[in-house]
Image (tube, grey):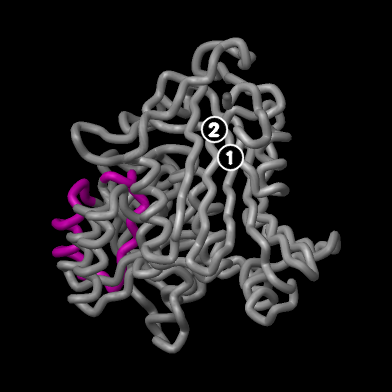
Amino acid sequence: MTRTVVLAGTSGYGSTYLRELTELEGRGTVRLVGLCDVRPLDRGAARQFGDRAFDTRLDRLLAATSPDLVLVATPIHTHLPLGRQVLDAGCHLLLEKPPLPSAAEWRELLRLAQRKGLSCQVGFQGLGSHAYARLAELMAAGELGRVNGIGGYGAWSRDDGYYQRSAWAGRRELDGVPVADGALTNPFAHAVATALALDNSTGWSDIAGLDMELLRVRDIQVDDTSCLRMRTAHGTVITIAVTLAARTPTEPVLVVHGTRRRAELHYTQDLLVLDGRPERHGRTSPLENLLAHLDDPQVPLQCDIAECGAFTRVLDSVNSAPAPRLISERWLTHEGEGLQARIHIPGVEQAVRASAEQLATFAELDAPWAA
């Protein structure tokens, strides 16, 4: 069955959805009937999609096109109003991660989707990795033995231009509206959500305890270097240690510490390493999975919005915690100028990895810049 689709948000991650929609249109799976953005289409998109309906207002576009489903790939603080418009129009929804910037907004959109009887998929792409699915199956079958803990680490680098990309970049709130653009809740949100899903701890009440070390190297409202440690209702300890101030960026990894086997999930690369042996896997995108679910409700959603309770609890806790502490200049190095300027924390790459390996916080690791 060919589904009609509208995309809200054509730049940023929306451009990835545009490429996927082009491929799916070629297969006859979908038909893109409309595009929505606050800005005109860029030159390339205008050449390729200029014959589709376009509007700067989503509600008006939905009334004109009546699509089956809508992809919302817009800034997080717009997710609730746009999500409301989609569901009120009777359309299924694919909402880019992170889903909502507060617990109250998550509950509101969840209730609306349930009341309307509509599907709402959240775009945590890592949960569509077949490497994730394979690891989850192994854990459920007890192949790793008792899981003592799950550690996650990520070390990326962002320049000054990253924090000037939009009015909401690097902010907890904008004009009184929650934003939650911190490292744990946006760029490394996948690590948090995937670790919770591996532990089968996706509900709001599945987190029994939560501690955070939130740090920053710039004059921003949010964390860019952070350590999160949770204990789930299953008794599992989960640590996620990340930074956007690395000198040597590496792709994020989740480490599952089992009594029988050790597993590493490189979720951006669809790579699973079991006891040092690599396995390459494919992935199913959130959109492909949503389409399959609409064709056959027996196919479960990769990430139903109802399964984002634990992640939302983390996000809400991070965004309401005391402001991230500014790391002293004595521990920092600088390179580049203007929008390309970067700030590094020497040794932070080793610290985030050690946190995942030892399930320890920065303070427990005696990281001097975290004291």
Distance Cα–Cα, label 2 vs label 1? 6 Å
Whether the residues at callouts 2 and 1 have beta carbons within 8 Å, the answer is yes
Find residue 31 and report its image quarter.
Answer: bottom left
Residue 336: percent from left, percent from top: 61, 13
Residue 10 seen from this side: yes
Quadrant location, the C terminus: top right
Residue 2's place in the image compared with 323, above or below, is: below
At label 2, counting other C-alpha atoms closer than 10 Å, the crowd grade (few under 14, some 14-19, many 20 or more) is many
N-term mark: 2 or 1: 2
Residue under the point 71% across and 68% down: 281
Residue 68: percent from left, percent from top: 28, 73
**In the image, 266: left or right of 165?**
right
What kind of element bears circle 2? strand
What kind of element bears circle 1? strand
Residue under the point 38% across and 81% down: 294
- Comparing 15 with 343, the one in front is 343
Residue under the point 31% across and 48% down: 101
Find residue 38 and report its image quarter.
Answer: top left
Residue under the point 68% across and 82% down: 141
Residue 160: percent from left, percent from top: 49, 21
**In the image, 135: left or right of 67?**
right
Q: Which label sits on residue 5? A: none
**Residue 74 inside the magenta-drawn segment:** yes
Q: Which residue is denoted by mark 2 in the rendering?
A: 225
> What is the span of residues highlighted in magenta in the rendered image?
55-77
Q: Which residue is denoted by mark 1 in the rendering?
A: 242
Residue 51 seen from this side: no
